[in-house]
Image (cartoon, rainbow, N blue to C red):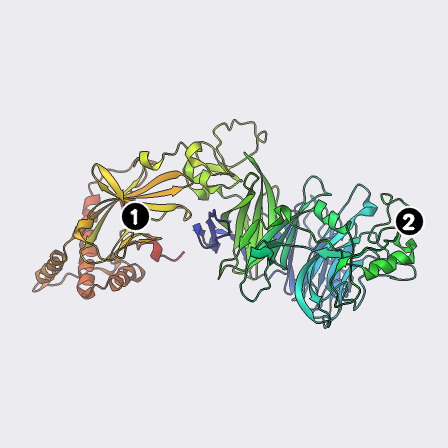
Amino acid sequence: SLSLSLSYSLSLLLSLPSLFLSLSSLSLCPSLQPQTMLLDEAHERLYVGAKNIMYSLSLERVNHQHREPECANYIKVLHRYNTTHLLACGTGAFNPHCAKIRVGHTGQVRQFELEEQSIESGRGRCPYDHNSPVTSTLDRGELYIGLYTDYWENDAALCRLNNQSYTRTERDDRQQLNEPKFIGSVVIPDNNDRDDDKVYFFFTERGTDAEGVNKAVYTRVGRVCANDQGGQRMLVNRWSSFLKTRLICSVAGPNGIDTHFDELEDVFVLKNKDEKNPEIFGLFSTTSAVFQGYAVCVYHMDDVRAAFNGQFAHRERPEHHWTPYEGRVPYPRPGSCASEVNGGGFSGSKEFPDEVLRFVRSHPVMFSPVLPLHRRPVLLQTEPGGRRLTQIAVDRVQAQDGHYHVLYIGTGDSVVLKVITIYNKDTDTIEEVLLEELQVFKVLLLQQLYVGSEVGVAQVRLHQCDLYGSECADCCLARDPYCAWDGITCSRYYPAGVYTKSRRFRRQDVRHGNAVQLCNGLQIDGEQYQGAGEMQVYGVESNSTLLECTPRSLQARVMWYIQRDPDREEVGGDERVVMTTHGLLFLRVRSGDAGVYVCQTVEHGYVHTLLRVTLHVLGGQKVGALIHKTGEEGEGEKKETCPTSRLPGPSSQLWYKEFLQLIGYGDSQKVEEYCERVWCSGKRRRKTKRRYTQPMEVGERKGRGKGDPHRAPRHTLDN
């Protein structure tokens, strides 16, 4: 399902959504079991590699039943090869194969055709097992991939493949790779010289102790030169530039002991106008057996490059600790690329001195790790029993008071969380705001979110401003950078200059959510009851009675007051009166509890009166006598049959029976007979009354009391 919520805590609370949406509100393409997805905005298609099939889905509606079973395997590698073709590689029932798929030119008749003559072995390009971890990226016709190349998954490698060469990491070298789990990869330029481009791989691996036993898990970022050709006499067809360092994501603890999130679950590289400096977002989990926690850390490329340009790590023997290498570093610096920026003295890595190649093979680890932005996570989830977080995607949004990163986080229970984080420079604190609970792709033109799971593929709008309500306060309190109050409704926010239409009434405050200032909200002392709902509730003395009041945002604090003219006083909870998520529950109502109750919510200083409830308390003896009298009147008379069509359905009757059991009312049979008579007679009275009502004007709204008379309470309905 899909739900939306707000949160303002230091640690992300995932249990308080404010709105719930069922999956039926999404566009769903069922039973795809996607393994990988490729977004093609030029052709307006979403290509999905799945189990025994590959799909080409329309971006307008992904649930269109259009299936082309050209490829019969698990598609694990899927990239745009050129302007007219895709490169797809699949497991092929433990016999990997790759092929090219023609999709045609942009603007031409849409094509989706497998070119059989292009089918070739996929060994080294695709794993044998669809559960095997793999990451890949394609740049200038060359495929860079991290995978296990063999059937038994003993040979892990970082590879580059093209038509002429095959370059990879060393076999059976635990210094380079030790039981890795490949997560992500990306090509990032360092400067305008394309020969100096670097390929970054993100993965986790095991550390080893003095006896060679695998112990702790670490998250690594590895780097190679995109133009690396290997060595001439040594490291032939092997990387001559491979280096790696640790990615740190931790929370400071007492006594200087940090809590580390060492297991990288997913990584997202947010590109911007400066392609040399994207932002890297990592989703981490703990490896502790004591508790399960998740964190999101952000890294800047300046810090990544500084770590790779720093000191090399060195240890004399396996049982020794790592220390900075203090000896002479050969020239050119190990890990650098053969490029004009680096002096232009070498036309390629095959010309590098053997001394450089020996050093890079024996010292692949950098001493300094990469630390995150602000030296801590921007988002935490450490609550017991919290959701399992699996994937992350990020969008950068311009709001009225600045730019914000919107995080979309996929969970193990098929939910996507939409979160923003706000850094306060003055207090050096980070606030997390959970906006919505919604493989994730952002479409710039269509503003759609594509969500893939084992169930299928769905599409969701990135902004759903209408769901926040029809009031200025609800819109501003949502703190969604996509949305703003335009004077009439909560609608899509557009930066100044996007449209020429005047938007001077536009109101938005993502950083503070100050609805009091933006919407002229009133404080508690001056709160009026204009626009509040009215309700009459009857309770039976010594029985349970619920005054129902549910706020739109569950992050709002609910306050109850009882009117004692001319003043009012706040209702406090005790062993008899309980504040619940559904309202104010009297476990044993008394005659002195009768009166007018006011339900208010307070959120970020904004006070909203939702409801005025008038509670009438009936004496228990009076109600018993009434039921007994009604029963006696029916004796001796022919019992009038109530047509089945006039009675509510079984699901509607069920709720009050369960409620009677809850409050411990003994004679439920009499109550049931009485309710049936009320339903039947009430139906006739309502029909008679409507004969004399005036016809409604066009556009006139129906009153609150004209809904389904047999409606069950909201909290008993299936969402």
Q: Amino acid at mark 1?
A: Gly
First in sequence: mark 1 vs mark 2: 2
**Residue of label 2:** 347
- Residue 676 occupies which quadrant of the picture? bottom left
> In front: 259, or 666?
259
For the point 73% across and 56% down, the residue is 245
Q: Quadrant of residue 223?
A: bottom right
Q: Residue furthest front?
A: 255
**x, y percentage for residue 498?**
59, 31
Residue neighbourhood size for the residue with mark 2, other residues' Cα within 10 Å, grouped as few (<14), some (14–19), many (≥20) = few
In this rendering, does residue 460 appear at all? yes
Mark 1 falls on what kind of element? Answer: loop
Q: Nearer the viewer, mark 1 or mark 2?
A: 2
Q: Which residue is mark 1?
A: 707
Quadrant the C terminus occupies: bottom left
- Figure check: 695 above or below 266: above
Q: Quadrant of residue 406?
A: top right
Q: Position of residue 718 (x, y in %)?
A: 38, 58
Left or right of 313? Residue 514 is left
What label does residue 585 carry, if any? Answer: none
Q: CA distance from mark 1 to mark 2?
A: 80 Å
In the foreground, 116 or 76: 76
x, y percent for residue 586: 25, 54
